[in-house]
Image: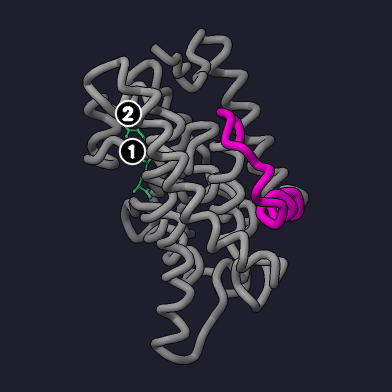
Amino acid sequence: MNKAPILYFAPQTCARVTLTALEEIGEPFEARLVAFLAGEHRKPEFLKVNPSGKVPALDTQDGVIVQNGAILSYLAEKHPEAGLLPVRGDAAGRADVLTQLFRCSSDLHPLVTRFVMAPMISTEADHAPQVREAARQALEFQLGALEARLSQQDWMMPEGWSIIDAYLAWIWFRITGVGFAADGFPAIGAHFDRASTRPSAIAALKREAIAEEELAERGLQFKPPAVTKA
Ligand SMILES: N[C@@H](CCC(=O)N[C@@H](CS)C(=O)NCC(=O)O)C(=O)O
């Protein structure tokens, strides 16, 4: 019998995208909480799973897979019936799918980190407002292209919903949660609302809520660090 995959995750993080993918697949899996505020992501047991000390990490029958983009590509290939990514017949078409996926994981995610975690990016605490403002400007620029795209089509890929939509929804949740102004991006806002009604998205949030309860009981609930102007 195949072993059920174990997803190492933390609520509110980008592991939500993998969680959504696993819910979309609908097969049994274990969601194992990594409590950042207890430093569990730097403990030897977790570093054996992912030496980078980051979530998501997915322990599968083929070994541990890390990096959201790699995990999502792996799951899409293993479970074609789940339709996580569009299937394209040619190299350029497949590259186009990966381009949109990497936009989220490689262009936008690092900006999300700077915007949300600004006080932890510079060694100088009072640089946080400048770090956040630079990230805000870069996000505004990058999201402009996606706003134009989503003004023309409901989902990131023309074929319909894909896990890339869950990725963008997580990005939107994260940045608007700490004050990114949504006004200039009505198509992305509407996309977020659509993506959030998907049963897999709702199921992922339920799993996160259970983890949040556990963290609250342990006094380890994460709140993004405040940025105060000097
Ligand atoms: N490039 C990685 C980034 C993963 C990542 O940054 N995860 C964050 C949560 S959103 C994390 O685990 N941060 C903890 C740390 O970096 O110490 C991926 O796409 O999987």
At numbered mark 2, what does the secondary structure look like: helix, strand or loop?
Answer: helix
Residue at left 48%, top 32%?
A: 10
What range is drawn magenta here?
176-194
Q: Nearer the viewer, residue 15 or 175?
A: 175
Is residue 180 on the magenta stretch? yes
Distance between mark 1 and mark 2 Cα atoms = 7 Å
The residue tagged 2 is 41
Place of residue 150 in the rendered image (x, y in percent of width and height, measured from the top left):
66, 65
Q: Nearer the viewer, residue 220 or 152?
A: 152
Three-letter code for the amino acid on which mark 1 is drawn: Lys
Residue at left 40%, top 17%?
A: 37
The residue tagged 1 is 54
State whether residue 126 appears in this view: yes
Three-letter code for the amino acid on which mark 2 is drawn: His
Mark 1 C-beta closer than 8 Å to ligand 1: yes
Residue at left 46%, top 39%?
A: 136
Residue at left 51%, top 85%?
A: 88
In the picture, measured across the screen, residue 125 lies left or right of residue 167, that is left
Is 85 rendered above or below residue 225? below
| Mark sitting earlier along the chain (1/2) | 2
Mark 2 C-beta closer than 8 Å to ligand 1: yes
In the picture, measured across the screen, residue 42 lies left or right of residue 214, that is left
Is 165 rendered above or below residue 206? below
